Image (cartoon, rainbow, N blue to C red):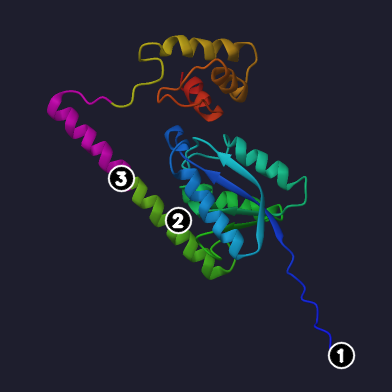
């Protein structure tokens, strides 16, 4: 009597997921759901289980890596529990500037971690051709965004020349009621509060942001550092 050979199921690989949106207004928008959906779809197709999600809320991809609390937490987790793979939706979730993007990729590789873009297969590989394509795409994306910024600046200058004024975004504290909130932030900071503590306190006290949303450490930092 013949026996049916036992089929061995492939082992499920564990991974973390890193998501980022650039502004607080995007936190409640489509940014996170879209990224989650792309990562989940890739994970199912590749027999990968996402065991933890790291969300960077309201952090610009143009900035350096000094103010990325979720990224810091991600690296701590990678170095502590055996998971060595990180999945992102696209490379621009790491950074919108080529130098920031490449710097982060180098950090992952140096520490022995694998990073995978769900919508850009193999683009994170160190194959010379892949690196060239990745860096060319990153440079083109950075160029396009710079051109958009330049066009907006020229438009503002043209409006100012025509009307005598061109109001940009007002700093926090300009509008009614914001100065009291700003003072509250400063008081919390003066007694040793960090960005996380201050944002948590504001949320607990029911204080809303200018856009009526939640406070995040990156937002508090931008306001207090600018001030």
Dot 2, how many residues are within 10 Å of its Cα: few (below 14), some (14-19), or many (20+)? many
Residue 139 image point, x, y percent: 42, 55
Residue 168 lies in the magenta-colored region: no
Q: What is the residue that sits farthest to the bottom in this orientation?
A: 1
Q: Nearer the viewer, residue 43 or 62?
A: 43
Closer mark to the observer between disc 1 and disc 3: 1
Residue at (52, 47) in percent of width and height: 100
Residue under numbered circle 3: 148
Question: Which disc number belongs to residue 9?
Answer: none
Residue under numbered circle 1: 1
Judge left or right: residue 161 versus residue 126.
left
Q: Work out whether 201 lies above or below 145.
A: above
| Image quadrant containing the N terminus | bottom right
Q: Nearer the viewer, residue 213 or 164?
A: 213
Residue stretch in magenta: 147-167
Dot 1, how many residues are within 10 Å of its Cα: few (below 14), some (14-19), or many (20+)? few
Residue 152 lies in the magenta-colored region: yes
Q: What is the residue that sits farthest to the left in this orientation?
A: 162
Asked if the residues shown at circle 1 and circle 2 are in contact, with their CB atoms under 8 angstroms apart, the answer is no
Q: Work out whether 110 lies above or below 130.
A: above
């Amino acid at each position: 009597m013949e026996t049916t050979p036992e089929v061995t199921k492939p082992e499920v690989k564990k991974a973390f997921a890193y998501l980022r949106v650039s502004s607080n207004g995007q936190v409640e928008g489509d940014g996170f759901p879209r990224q989650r959906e792309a990562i989940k779809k890739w994970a199912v197709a590749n027999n990968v289980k996402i065991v933890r999600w790291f969300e960077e809320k309201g952090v610009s991809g143009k900035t350096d890596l000094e103010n990325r609390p979720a990224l810091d937490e991600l690296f701590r987790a990678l170095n502590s529990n055996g998971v060595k793979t990180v999945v992102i939706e696209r490379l621009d979730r790491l950074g919108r500037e080529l130098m920031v993007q490449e710097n982060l990729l180098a950090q992952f590789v140096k520490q022995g971690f694998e990073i995978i873009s769900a919508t850009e297969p193999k683009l994170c590989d160190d194959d010379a051709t892949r690196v060239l394509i990745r860096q060319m795409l990153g440079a083109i994306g950075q160029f396009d965004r710079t051109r958009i910024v330049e066009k907006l600046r020229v438009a503002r200058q043209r409006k100012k020349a025509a009307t005598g004024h061109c109001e940009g975004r007002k700093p926090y504290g300009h509008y009614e009621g914001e100065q009291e909130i700003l003072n509250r932030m400063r008081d919390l900071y003066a007694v040793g509060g960090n960005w996380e503590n201050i944002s948590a306190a504001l949320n607990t006290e029911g204080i809303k942001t200018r856009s009526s949303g939640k406070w995040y450490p990156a937002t508090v930092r931008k306001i207090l550092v600018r001030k």
